[in-house]
Amino acid sequence: MSTRISALQPKTVSIALALLLCLILAPFTEAQAGTFRCQYFTLNLPQNWKLINGPFKKGGGETAVLGRRDHKASVQMLYGTSVKENFKTIVEGYAKGLKASPRFMGKSQAWFDTTRKGQQFRFIFCQDEAAQLLAIFILNGKPGDMDFIRTGIQTKYRGLVPQRITGR
């Protein structure tokens, strides 16, 4: 009987190690569904999120739409070059057109909420002044569900990373 047990031990150890490896890697593979890449940043997408449309060129920049597979949230992203002196004018122009009041966080970040056709939207504007780049994130859904935009973005342009998504 001891021969039989010793013969099973390496196999049992291998299975145990394989299961342990699966348990260790599972949070990393399930938490991230994919990666969105553009020339200015990389954004790690959480589980159940995917690229819906784009990226495609629009108005001198690019735009892309990300969405949850259950259709409960989406993010439209517009990004490209911008003159830093135009930041406030751009934010106020969007807000005026949507009858909203913008809130500025320093000179290079702003946001506002608006409702359109019964849907809640949050517009977040981020500018990297040094590189003269602008990113606009239009959130449709619960802002707390979209904090991955702030935490999952990787870029050398620090100004393009939103300071907050959920704060009011």
Image: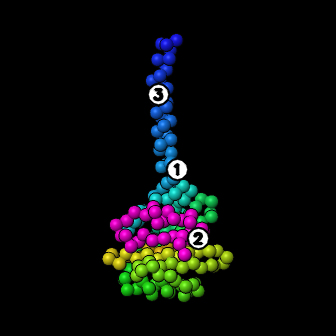
Say what amino acid the circle numbered 1 marks: Glu
Rendered position, 100 above or below 17: below
Image disc number at residue 50 = none
Q: Is residue 83 visible?
A: yes
The residue lying furthest to the right in this view is 118
**Magenta stretch contains residue 17:** no
Q: Residue at x 49, y 40 (%)?
A: 22
Q: Earlier in the sequence, mark 3 or mark 1?
A: 3
Q: Which residue is mark 2?
A: 140
Q: Is residue 77 left or right of residue 132?
A: right
Counting from the top left corner in percent of width and height, residue 20 is at 48, 37
Q: Which residue is labeled 3 in the image? A: 13
Mark 3 vs mark 1: give the one in front.
Answer: 3
* Residue 53 visible within the image: no
Dot 2 amino acid type: Asn
Give the Cα distance between marks 3 and 1.
25 Å
Disc 1 on helix, strand or loop?
helix
Q: Establish if 132 lies above or below 30.
A: below
Q: Which residues are magenta?
A: 139-168
Residue under pointer 1: 30
